[in-house]
Amino acid sequence: MIIFPYIFRCLAACFILIACSSLPAQDFTYQHQSISIEKQASIRFSDIKEDWMPTVQNLEMPSPLGRSYRSDLIRRKLERKINFKIFELPGIHYPGEQVNIPVLGQNFKGNSFNGNVPNDNHLSISNQGKLISVINSTIWIYDIKTDSILSKLSFAAFADTLHLSGVKYDPKTIYDPVSDRFILAFLNGYLDSTSYIVLAFSQSNDPSGLWNFYAVPGNPLNNGTWSDYPSMGISSGSLFIGVNTFTNGSTNNSGFVESTFWQIDKNSGYAGNTLNSEYFSGMTSGSGKEFFNITPINKGTGPSSDSMLLISNRNLDTLFNDSIFLFRVTGPVNQASLDIITGKTDVPYSLPPQARQPKGHEFDTNDSRILAGFYENGQVQYVACTLNPATGFAGIYHGFIKHPFDTNPEFTAQIIGDTAADLGYPNISYTGKDSLDQEAILTFNLTSPNLNPSCGAIFFDNDKSYSDLLIIHEGSDYVNLVSGAYERWGDYSGSQRKYNEPGTVWMSGSYGRSRTQFPRYINSTWIAELTSPDSLHHHIPPTEAGVHAFPNPFRDMLTFTFTLASPDMVTFSIYDLKGSLVKQLLSTYTQQGKNQFTFSASPLATGTYILQISTQDAILATEKIIKQ
């Protein structure tokens, strides 16, 4: 029984049932409830002196004959394997399409193995080079500039301070480049009475300093459920957390009820104030079917508006499916609207097969849920696990949604496969340097009967081609931690753009190694810096007709006129001629018709710049300006 009292107030006396627009025409419904959550503690890592790091690890993989979610997945994969025949599918790509590989920079061994399975790698890194690496169930803080570890701590140590009982798992972390702060989350408990999302906001850009801690209820509807598998994203004012809910006492993801998400005022978290939040639940398609896994999608270059995109799919289908569900949230907490549309991709996805490793062991690849993505320059890119039908191996599903805020977004996809290896648990980060770029680095785990579990990366360029596969760190042995031939590979991997270094991405992945003590064959963490091979190439945005900046050249004040076809959220930014962002001047809701924007350029050094005006969906105009 949990002994930590959480405090939250329902600000809405009842649920609000809303019919949402869709594409094609269907009825979607959702409910939302306003909830306030009080801060429970402010904690400095260095103030926690006692850390016992207790863990309990179940060493049994579910039997295919069982009744759990994972048992069902294993059974369905085995049945398909028996009857499966390879076939070609349009849209399959293999690494090595005459594109340079990512450039490997700093890289080193990450968090020590602490007895937990799976690894669940995740990370965040600040503009100052402070890096947070989390696995089940520890947090390490690095300073990459001094190549030093600043702090190591288990999530159980936080629990002692917060008086939370129950297992700690599924850690996630995110860096907010606008606020220059960190956010950390992990789950507590598998019962409705012990289920919480433990949420921490750093008070400064120093992760070794004070953090504000909150216990977000995992059973906010008091319906006997608990929350699992958090996913995180941020807008300019909000933190979004997606979770799956399950019936009380269910294990291995049996007893699924629904997927939900939270919208939380992040600035209150940084300040240590009561959190205003909104809990979105009861989301169903026109057929009344619940969504399974809803993933927030971050802006590639950092949050710039109050809008947030989230994505889901039919990720449990054994056979191929082409449905993608797009959730669009607009507005701050307690004022936000939600609409849900459905799209059909041109390349379908499927339940990934188990991944092969040496010595007859296999990795659990879970389902084909959307694991990560970003939105930039009018397009979403996202990744998931899938079956590569041309080989029968596990591959990466690389999806695209063009103009996601339009009435009719375009849904397309490609499958990335390897002729010898299984690829799993991908992540993706934007590496573009200006408003014309769509390039990215994809990171993932990989293995084969002849390759020990390793982690790798691929560069995706603006021509939609993929580089050769870069093995970031090759494992030295196979993994054997649970009974039987099936092993837990990890439920996700980490990747984040370094926001003040366009083209640079930091990742954390998993690899296999052996040691002398028990357990001998273990998963370990590797952390690496990757840079776009296109880092020396910069686009200079063209001047658009119908836009006028005056006076130009200028000394102090500059006025910029433009026309909007319809009201929209508009962002004004200044770039240098290399395509690097100098300053985001303003992001605001702007009226239809002719508009005028004025700003003082006195902070700018003498030189030539690009002034850009953009909406959430497109670049409206660019203008070369000269500061005298």
Image: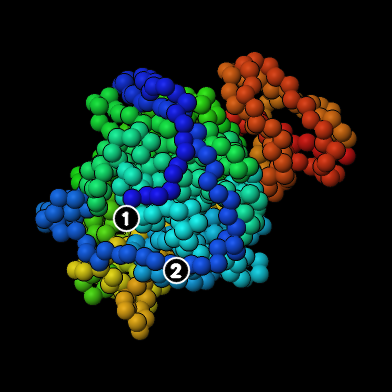
Q: Which residue is mark 2?
A: 52
Mark 2 or mark 1: whose residue is earlier in sequence: 2
Q: Is residue 48 above or below residue 67?
A: below
Q: Which residue is mark 1?
A: 395
Give 164 or 539, whichever is nearer the viewer. Answer: 164
Give 59 or 64, whichever is nearer the viewer. Answer: 59
The three-letter code of the residue at mark 1 reads Gly
- Give how far across and how far down residue 298 sits, in percent: 51, 42
Crowding near pointer 2: few (<14 within 10 Å), some, many (20+)?
few
Crowding near pointer 1: few (<14 within 10 Å), some, many (20+)?
many
Rounded to the nearest whole Å, what is the CA distance between mark 2 and mark 1?
39 Å
| Residue 387 in the figure: left or right of residue 17 | left
Report the residue at 84% width, 45% height from top: 605
Q: Nearer the viewer, mark 2 or mark 1?
A: 2
Q: Residue furthest top?
A: 593
| Residue 465 in the figure: left or right of residue 236 | left
SS under mark 1: strand
Q: Is residue 289 above or below residue 39?
A: above
- Give how far across and how far down residue 454 sits, in percent: 38, 68
The three-letter code of the residue at mark 2 reads Trp
Report the residue at 64% width, 27% height from top: 588
